[in-house]
Image (spheres, helix red, strand yellow):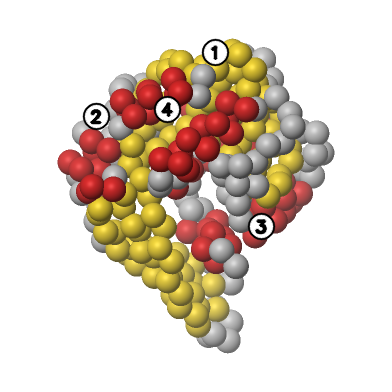
Amino acid sequence: MSVFDLYAACYDLLYRDKDYASEARWVAGLLPAARPLAVLELGCGTGGHALEFARAGHRVHGIDLSPRMVAQARARAAQAADGPWPEDRLRFDEGDARHVRTGAVHDAVVALFHVMSYQTTNADLDAAFATARAHLAPGGDFVFDFWYGPAVLSDRPRHVLKEVADERVAVRRRTTPTLHVNANRVDVRFELHVRAQQGGAEQTFVEVHPMRYLFLPEIGLLLERHGFALRLARAWLRDSEPDEHSWYACVAARAV
């Protein structure tokens, strides 16, 4: 079982306050076409953004590395109040953002919740950008968010404790970051303690998520290498360019 499969067990509970609808609307606003689009989402997780894109009228194919997250995404779509969704409108499959090829051409490729920052080596980034370009015809759009290097170095990663619970489990997550300045990487160590609300059974497990922070010049180089033209860069959920206070940033590019 991969690190992402373990994390998936608590994922939706830990991020239950995440406003997928608002984030999906903001990302859709970066896409110039007003018509319904065929969207490929790389690293779709448990399907929160994909479902909102589908609700906005787009046809969405979500891909994720974790079988458990794919299963949860399918369950989310089936159990939604406006579901179940037909596969020609909303579909989820397993796949690696670096290597997957669906055999289809899409109007837009999106990679959200820092999927591109999970590509920690130059080879990983090259492969993921190649995947995006392989699924777009000229004029198609690629939108992704990432950890923004100037802000990570200006406002260093911190230790964080988060506690959440529902009727099934209580989860305590302690986050310990280790900054590797010369590798442009932060190793995020999650220690999760999970306790069943009934019976009191407990489990503790540790995961390390390596995250690469990126800079706009290297992103520009990658985009050019893979047949994209940069359209805009924004601080996440803002209309302004990212700066040293913008831990999360987003880029929209056009396939040429």
Is 55 displayed left or right of 213 in the figure? right
Earlier sequence position, callout 3 versus callout 2: 3
Q: Tell me whether the residue at label 4 lies in contact with that at label 2, contact meaning CB atoms closer than 8 angstroms.
A: no
Would you name the residue on which mark 4 appears? 222
Name the one closer to the observer, 219 or 200.
219
222 relative to 78, above or below:
above
Q: Residue at x 42, y 71 (%)?
A: 206
Name the one closer to the observer, 38 or 20.
38
Q: Quadrant of residue 49?
A: top right
Would you name the residue on which mark 3 appears? 67
- Find residue 242 and report its horizontal and vertical position in percent: 29, 28
Residue type at tag 1 = Val
Is 148 displayed left or right of 39 in the figure? left
Tell me the distance, in whole angstroms, between the alpha carbons under discs 1 and 4.
Answer: 14 Å
Callout 1 secondary element: loop
Earlier sequence position, callout 1 versus callout 2: 2
Q: Quadrant of residue 84?
A: top right
Would you name the residue on which mark 2 appears? 243
- Find residue 168 and report its horizontal and vertical position in percent: 58, 72
Residue type at tag 3 = Pro
Q: Residues within 10 Å of mark 3 (few under 14, many from 20)?
A: some
Q: In the rendered image, which quarter contains the C terminus?
A: top right
Q: Is residue 32 visible?
A: no
- Find residue 192 and report its horizontal and vertical position in percent: 43, 70
Q: Nearer the viewer, mark 3 or mark 2?
A: 3
Residue type at tag 2 = Asp
Earlier sequence position, callout 1 versus callout 4: 4
Q: Nearer the viewer, mark 1 or mark 3?
A: 1
Q: Which mark is residue 256?
A: 1
